[in-house]
Image (cartoon, rainbow, N blue to C red):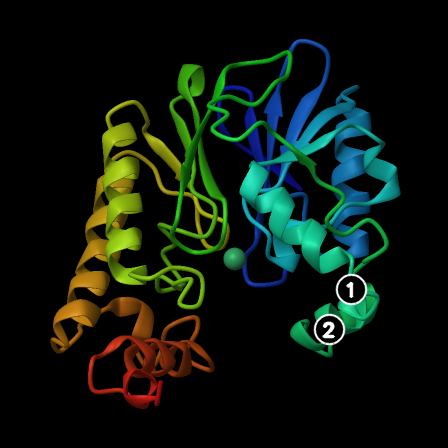
Amino acid sequence: MLTQVAEGVLVHQSEFMQSNAVVVQGQAGVLLIDPGIQDHEMVCLANDLQELGQDVVAGFSTHPHWDHLLWHPRLGSAPRFGTARCAGAIQTRLADPQFQDFVRTLIPPDIVEQVPLDLLGHITALPAGATVIPWDGPRVRIIEHNAHAPGHAALVIEERGVLVAGDMLSDVLIPMLNVMGTADPIEDYLAALRLLEGAAGDVDVVIPGHGSVGGSGQVTARISQDRAYMHALRDAEVLSDPRLDPSAYGKDFLPDVHDQQLHYLTPSSEHDQAPG
Ligand SMILES: [Zn+2]
């Protein structure tokens, strides 16, 4: 089911981790951002678009994680864009003949058979430093940064007042850092939040990669919440974050993610005492 969240901007949410696919209406068809997860969900989306008389004329993946790189034949053969670093990261992995087998190990067993991997990651690189998605529709500004994954991009649909945040600014998931990909993951994440803050004045709807769409006031509230998480991680402070509450959505796995990040990023961790 497609839900309109702003004029000409619709969201299709997956059963898997509240993943949001975003549809932006253009002149002659739609831009589809992070299309979805399970076969039947992408078929449902394709059917909805068919009923609206809309073809997909461009795709975009916000970052090179499997759950943002999927596609379905019913969605057609439009170019699927990503930042140069996103495309580079996935192309390197696709060159490994074992990659699909590896991806299967990342997908929960109860849905792995429902996730179509044939078209995973067929991303066309935008030029390095590209600031807009090339398509015939509302201007979509790319805010690339070095936070959750290589080449991660948030998107600002200026005319519609919408921020597509990729895997940041979620109301259900804590910030997940790209701990292996950068020398200072916490500072890079804080820098990314400052970039999003710079765009916040232009938007009143935020669509996270996972979780619920936030309305007016939520953009800055979620930036503040993610920043408080990062400061607590950086300063080894006691953390009070509703997303880590024992009754919260991610109670089965987020406390472990948090512990791993804490372990990896605090100066006393074994990692920093490794020889060499
Ligand atoms: Zn991700």
Q: Quadrant of the C terminus?
A: bottom left
Circle 2: residue type: Phe
- Of residues 2 and 184, the one drawn nearer to the viewer in this rendering: 184
Q: Position of residue 91 (x, y in %)?
A: 71, 50
Please tell me whether mark 1 sits on a helix, a strand or a loop. loop
* Callout 1–callout 2 Cβ contact below 8 Å: yes
Left or right, 252 with respect to 44, comes to left
Tell me the quarter of the picture where residue 134 sits.
top right
Dot 2: few (<14), some (14–19), or many (≥20) neighbours within 10 Å? few
Height in image: 68 above or below 5?
below
Ligand 1 has an atom within 8 Å of the beta carbon of the residue at disc 2: no
Please tell me whether mark 2 sits on a helix, a strand or a loop. helix
Left or right, 62 with respect to 135, comes to left
Dot 1: few (<14), some (14–19), or many (≥20) neighbours within 10 Å? few
- Of residues 133 and 216, the one drawn nearer to the viewer in this rendering: 133
- Of residues 56 and 49, the one drawn nearer to the viewer in this rendering: 56
Going 77% across and 45% down the picture, which residue do you hit? 71
- How many marks do you count on the picture? 2
Which residue bears the numbered disc 1? 96
Which residue bears the numbered disc 2? 102
Height in image: 159 above or below 179?
above
- Residue 100 can be seen, yes or no: yes
Circle 1: residue type: Asp
- Residue 14 can be seen, yes or no: no
Tell me the quarter of the picture where residue 104 sits.
bottom right
Going 31% across and 83% down the picture, which residue do you hit? 263
Q: CA distance from mark 1 to mark 2?
A: 10 Å
Q: Position of residue 143 (x, y in %)?
A: 40, 33
Comes first in the chain, label 1 or label 2: 1
Going 24% across and 31% down the picture, which residue do you hit? 198
